[in-house]
Amino acid sequence: MTAALEQTYRQAILNLVLVAATLVACAGLLTGAALAPAPALAQPFIVVVCLGFTAAIASCAPDSLRVLRGSRNALDHLRRQLDQLPEVEHPLGL
């Protein structure tokens, strides 16, 4: 079973928010390390850690997007099925 089938809609949204927050945090950290007078040994370490962590966390994004697209397709399918049902009058005439 793949990770996309194990995620719920809420988990997929939270995962994508986590990916976006990680990207922003790592971009800020890289910018801060480049602008501040950081030690020469710290800059390559910060770059490697930020790029590696961002790549690792972003590897889950395609599964989350697949879950979101699948739920949207399921909702469209349900709406098409409901549109095909015949209209019936209320039994009490309301």
Image (cartoon, grey):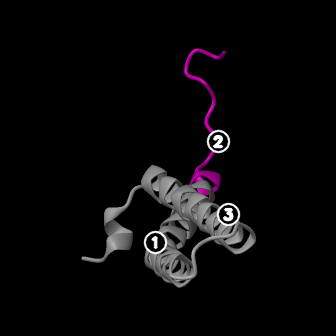
For the residues labelled 1 and 3, the Cα–Cα distance comes to: 16 Å
- Residue 1: percent from left, percent from top: 24, 76
Residues marked 1 and 3 touching at CB (< 8 Å) = no
Q: Which residue is mark 1?
A: 57
Residues marked 3 and 2 touching at CB (< 8 Å) = no
Residue type at mark 1: give it.
Answer: Ile
- Residue 60: percent from left, percent from top: 44, 73
Residue type at mark 3: give it.
Answer: Gly
Image depth: mark 1 or mark 3 in front: 3
Q: Which residue is mark 2?
A: 87
Q: Earlier in the sequence, mark 1 or mark 2?
A: 1
For the residues labelled 1 and 2, the Cα–Cα distance comes to: 49 Å
Q: Is residue 87 magenta?
A: yes
| Residue at 61% over, 57% down | 84
Image depth: mark 1 or mark 2 in front: 1
| Residue at 59% over, 67% down | 26
Q: Residues within 10 Å of mark 1 (few under 14, many from 20)?
A: some
19 or 24, nearer to the observer: 24
Q: Residues within 10 Å of mark 2 (few under 14, many from 20)?
A: few
